[in-house]
């Protein structure tokens, strides 16, 4: 979809989500053909002419940053939504050069951070929510039904968005599945606004739109939000119900990848459940002693992690670099 159409769709959708009383305008009880503010009402709040705003929604005007800020304030956008608005406007001004991006890589420093968290469930996700690596407890908590070595294959990596919407195990894992699903969509839409030329991301969105009516409805809502931190109740098939806060951290100087950590409140039953999960999935001493070491395995406090693997990438000297 063109940048002009995306910008217009975002503005129309957000305008429809506001009522006159939300922005201090009188509501005379008149029947409106469509929900939300009228174009002339939004233009009045933003301090621009109605005709100019109409051209903007129709993709026939290129707004300045100041005008975008005024429109964002009128729409009551938060910081993340305001940034998304500017991303869409920048996209509308330039010709998009579509290309197939290379497979995402993960550097030794990020793998080192993943190993350093020990038994805390953790994974590294990429721009399109592909799992680039996970530690043993991260695999056990988020996707114990999948091949632990999956992230090592760039062509078949687990994808968090695809799992949330299309995988029954992941759907059952979250007590508030709609809340988790909305967070995934809102973050994915922010990424799509920043990277309109990413054909793999566009293909993922197309696939989910076709295969999941719920994704299609949430995507059409045009809401955006970063997945920084959220509390989720999880229903794990091995250790039962537990509540964790999922933190999404960016490695230094890297906006494309995120380290996702699942942390339970100290002293809580949920923390005890995570400790049980760690013990239950730890390799036995005899297995560690006798089995052959697989390339790319991340070690934990109990020795080589039997079910946790990270991809091996060529280092600057041409050797495989796992960060271990």
Image (spheres, rainbow, N blue to C red):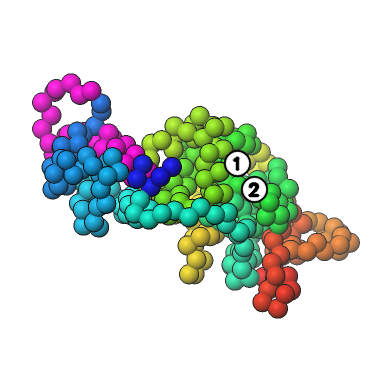
The Cα–Cα distance between marks 2 and 1, rounded to whole angstroms, is 7 Å
Q: Residue at x 78, y 64 (%)?
A: 295
Q: Earlier in the sequence, mark 2 or mark 1?
A: 2
Q: Farthest residue to the right: give it.
A: 290
Residue 211: x and y, percent? 57, 32
Residue 315: x and y, percent? 68, 73
Whether label 2 touches label 1, CB < 8 Å: yes
Q: Which numbered dot is residue 16?
A: none
Q: Dividing the image into 4 quarters, which one contains the C terminus?
A: bottom right
Q: Dividing the image into 4 quarters, which one contains the N terminus?
A: top left
Kindly identify which residue carries mark 2: 158
Q: Residue at x 34, y 45 (%)?
A: 4
In the image, the segment drawn in magenta is: 6-33
**How crowded is the residue under tag 2: few (<14 C-alpha within 10 Å), some, or many (20+)?**
many
Residue 82: x and y, percent? 30, 52
Q: Is residue 210 left or right of residue 135?
A: left
Q: Secondary structure at mark 2?
A: loop
The answer to which of 81 and 303 lies nearer the viewer is 81
Residue 112 lies, with reference to residue 80, above or below; the image says below
Q: Farthest residue to the top: give it.
A: 31
Residue 277 falls within the magenta-colored stretch: no
Q: Is residue 23 visible?
A: no
**How crowded is the residue under tag 1: few (<14 C-alpha within 10 Å), some, or many (20+)?**
some
Q: Farthest residue to the bottom: give it.
A: 317
Q: Residue at x 25, y 48 (%)?
A: 61
Q: Which numbered dot is residue 163?
A: 1
Residue 24 falls within the magenta-colored stretch: yes
Q: Is residue 171 left or right of residue 68?
A: right
């Amino acid at each position: 979809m063109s940048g002009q159409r995306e910008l217009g769709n975002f503005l129309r959708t957000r305008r429809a989500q506001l009522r006159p009383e939300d922005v201090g305008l009188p509501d005379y009880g008149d029947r409106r053909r469509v929900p939300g503010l009228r174009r002339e009402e939004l233009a009045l709040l933003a301090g621009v002419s109605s005709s100019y705003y109409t051209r903007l929604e129709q993709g026939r005007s290129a707004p300045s940053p100041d005008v975008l800020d005024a429109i964002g304030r009128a729409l009551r956008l938060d910081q993340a939504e305001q940034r998304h608005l500017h991303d869409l406007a920048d996209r509308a001004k330039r010709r998009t050069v579509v290309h197939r991006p290379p497979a995402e890589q993960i550097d030794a420093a990020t793998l080192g951070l993943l190993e350093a968290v020990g038994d805390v469930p953790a994974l590294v996700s990429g721009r399109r929510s592909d799992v680039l690596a996970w530690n043993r407890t991260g695999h056990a908590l988020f996707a114990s039904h999948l091949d632990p070595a999956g992230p090592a294959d760039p062509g078949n990596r687990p994808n968090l968005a695809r799992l949330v919407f299309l995988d029954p195990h992941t759907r059952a894992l979250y007590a508030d599945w709609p809340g988790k699903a909305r967070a995934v969509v809102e973050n994915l839409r922010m990424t799509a606004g920043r990277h309109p030329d990413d054909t793999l991301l566009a293909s993922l969105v197309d696939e989910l739109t076709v295969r999941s009516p719920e994704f299609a409805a949430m995507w059409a809502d045009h809401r955006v939000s970063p997945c920084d931190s959220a509390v989720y109740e999880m229903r794990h098939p091995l250790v039962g119900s537990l509540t964790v806060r999922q933190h999404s951290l960016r490695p230094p100087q890297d906006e494309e990848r995120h380290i996702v950590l699942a942390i339970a409140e100290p002293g809580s039953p949920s923390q005890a459940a995570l400790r049980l999960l760690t013990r239950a999935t730890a390799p036995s001493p005899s297995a560690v002693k006798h089995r052959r070491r697989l390339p790319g395995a991340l070690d934990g406090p109990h020795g080589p992690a039997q079910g946790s693997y990270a991809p091996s990438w060529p280092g600057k000297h041409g050797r495989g670099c796992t960060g271990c």
